[in-house]
Image: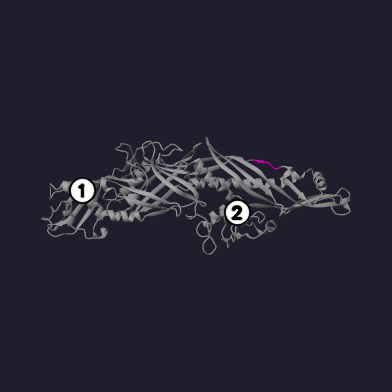
Amino acid sequence: MRSWSPLLLLALPLGTLSGAAEAAHPAGASIPDAATIDLTPEGLQVVTDILPGLLPGDIAVPAISDGARTGFPQCLLGGYEYEVSGVYVDFEVASASIVPNTGRLDLEITLLVGVNSPSDPFYLHGEVECIGTSCDGYVDPFYATVTTELGLRVIPDPTTGEPTLDATVGDLDLSYTLTGANIHLDNCFIGTVEDVLNWFGLSIYDLILSLAAPYIDGLLGDFAPEIETLLEDTFSSLQLNEELDVNGILLAAQLAPSDVAIDPNGVRIYMDGSMSTDTVASCIQEYDPSSSLETATDPPVLGSAPAGIPTGYHAALNLSDDFGNQALYSLWRGGLLCYQVDEELVGFALDTGLLNSLADGSFDDLFPSPSPMVIQTRPAVPPTLVFDGDNDLGLNLEQLGLDFYADLDGRESRIVAIDIDMVAGADLEFDGTTGNLGVVVDLGTDALTATVTDNEFKPGTEAAIQENFAGLFDTLLGSLVGGLLGDLSFALPSFTGLGLTDLALEGAGDQGDWLGGYAWLGTVSYGAEAGGCDDTGGCSGGARAAAVQRGACCSSPCPWPWSPCGAGATKTERRAGQGRGLPAGSAQGLYPCMPPGSSPATGQLSSSCQV
């Protein structure tokens, strides 16, 4: 027999028993709409706040020039030339929003675009018939607005054929507010420059726009895949296809997207899932129905929440009772409740003196002196979880048989058999600072019901045994289960520095048979992808990729084959190809990592950095 596992009380926080039902899911069957993942308009805005970290701070523009009949004396015969160098374009996200609409997401990003500055101008030279002039120039920051539509759908993965979430970005609509009044030229004859540019069919406005526009367009072209990846990863992080080992029982766990719904209340990803095991424990075979309870009901309405949940939550994970019941059925089927309680397990001598405690001394004549005893479980019914009780989660146990064995007249005999029915509770406590999810146990022995099913040796003591059993249960298993579960905690992950800052659990749906996890998101320091530097100045784990993606880069050295860019470089040095440094005011001593094959003139960061 398998020893008792306290993990059962936590199991998987899914499902509830809604009452007897004829419908059932065959063992291992995929359950439609096993879970839903929701992102509210408020949550979409939090995700949108990541977007500025995906943009480079500035991009260097290669010098351009043109001319005809240059050099003396040819320039006297209608010679013209011009040159523009030292240009860089700064980008800053002034505002960004992703707004859910019917069947789509509307993205709008307003960029504040600058071309050089008064303290770091570009160089402009013009010459007409051997008469030249040179200018220092810059452009006041101007606004560029980008709008597009985003789509989400479920498609087969090209490699595996498994369903996967696919995000699409529509055509980008770009508009400017740049005017001639934004352009400043100093220390030159403006008329001469205009004459030069007019010769080529240009104006100063045309020239500056022609320099900046391709880089803005190119930036947005590179930005679109980043948005797609951000949306896909935000939702797909909860996709599951793993084999879990729960106290030696191998549980095949699958959760995959099946459909997407978008309306003004937010985005919902529907997930199909299954929990199964190929093993049928010997202690379960005579009881196994080869199916789990089916009580299919509609998930909670997108954007809704139970009365106890504060408004303004960012995301919700709704888990159906069918999915939970299947998970617990599979664990039960694999023998998780098949265990033996003995001295080794409880840590003290387990003997027939406990029978006298149960029956007010009635077993004294059978056992004048205490004899060793064991208790064998007899789990006849799969457990289920309830969501609408006093605790966050409740484990409903019915007909959990306990058989008390001791040596009587030279042979091991079953002295007493008891069936217990109870609901044990657990509350989950989340620490938004550390990302740990802890468990506080409530065994609920006040609601425990014990029924004596076999009492061959001392008939008539059933009432006393049933009345006294709750105290015995707590003595035998309470401290063990409560202590072990109380020490359990789970470290939640983060994504590009974004993670849970608060979490509330509540039964949801019209019948309270869905578990709703309502989350608030924000920038966090915990998790494998929280982004940061280790004690040596480099990045550890998945931190570098996340930090690079956000633009919050780690100390040199960068992982091969990436190369560091100088944090102290001026914009002029960066334009000369010495890499992209940090914007003014950034943390000192940090170095952006430039991907292999990228142009030193742009030094654009990539989200694909891997250690």
Q: State left or right for residue 231 relative to residue 458.
A: right
Figure quadrant of residue 204 = top right
Q: State left or right for residue 443 relative to residue 192.
A: left
Query: Where in the figure is residue 419, as x and y percent of width and height?
Result: 22, 46
Give the residue displayed 41% in from the left and 51% down from the top. Answer: 430
Q: Residues within 10 Å of mark 1 (few under 14, many from 20)?
A: many
**For marks 2 and 1 on the same chain, the one whose residue lies earlier in the sequence:** 1
Using the image, determine if residue 170 lies above or below residue 522: above
Could you tell me if the residues under marks 2 and 1 are in contact, i.e. CB atoms within 8 Å? Answer: no
Callout 2 amino acid: Leu
Using the image, determine if residue 4 lies above or below residue 381: below
Q: Is residue 150 visible?
A: yes
Quadrant where the N terminus is found in the figure:
bottom left
Q: State left or right for residue 352 relative to residue 481.
A: left
Give the residue displayed 70% in from the left and 47% down from the top. Answer: 140
Q: Residues within 10 Å of mark 2 (few under 14, many from 20)?
A: many
Residue tagged 2: 605
Closer to the camera in the image, 82 or 326:
82
* Label 1: which secondary element: strand
Give the residue displayed 59% in from the left and 40% down from the top. Answer: 148
Q: Residue furthest left?
A: 365
Query: Where in the figure is residue 57, as x and y percent of width and height?
Result: 63, 52
| Magenta span | 174-178
Callout 1 amino acid: Ile
Give the residue displayed 39% in from the left and 43% down from the top. Answer: 506
Residue tagged 1: 418
